[in-house]
Image (spheres, rainbow, N blue to C red):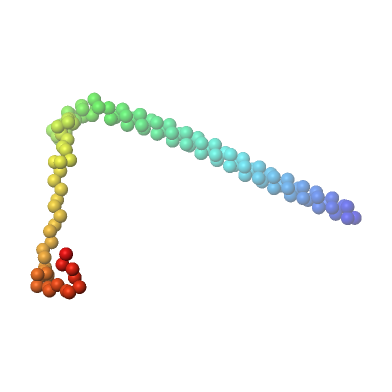
Amino acid sequence: MMRSVMYVLAAFTVMGLAFWAYQENYATQQSVKEVRRLHASIGDAHERLGMLRAEWAYLNRPDRLIDLAEINFDRLGLLPLSPEAFGTIEAIVYPLPEILPITDPIDINSIPPSDSEDPL
């Protein structure tokens, strides 16, 4: 009798573990699919980023920008950069600190020196 109960319990344990293993296998497969989808999405994002960088480099070609500056000179007034267009640090005028007025002066000549003070 005890042996048959143990067999039944062992059979239920095996079935329970099989059910648990099936559920874990299914969850793992879903996780693997999600990881693959994310990798594909990251790859697509890298491709888009590469294309945007190439387009940015194409649109910022110096000869193209010079042509645009010349075409729109009347509206924008853009001039080509030259070394003379830049100043030096010495040419920058910094504001002087504000000098506050003395509102309550103290006359130190009228204060007698104390005996404990050494004049020098």
Q: Residue at x 13, y 52 (%)?
A: 96
Image quadrant in which you'd find residue 27 = top right
Observer able to see residue 76: no
Q: Position of residue 43 (x, y in %)?
A: 47, 33
Nearest the viewer among 108 and 103 is 108
111 relative position to 46: left or right:
left
Q: Position of residue 18 (x, y in %)?
A: 73, 45
Observer able to see residue 3: yes
37 relative position to 83: left or right:
right
Screen quadrant of the C terminus: bottom left
Outermost residue, top direction?
63
Q: Residue at x 85, y 54 (%)?
A: 5
Image quadrant in which you'd find residue 104 = bottom left
Nearest the viewer among 8 and 78 is 78
Screen quadrant of the N terminus: bottom right
Q: Residue at x 11, y 65 (%)?
A: 102
Q: Residue at x 73, y 48 (%)?
A: 17
81 relative position to 33: left or right:
left
Outermost residue, right direction?
1
Q: Position of residue 10 (x, y in %)?
A: 81, 50
Q: How many marks?
A: 0
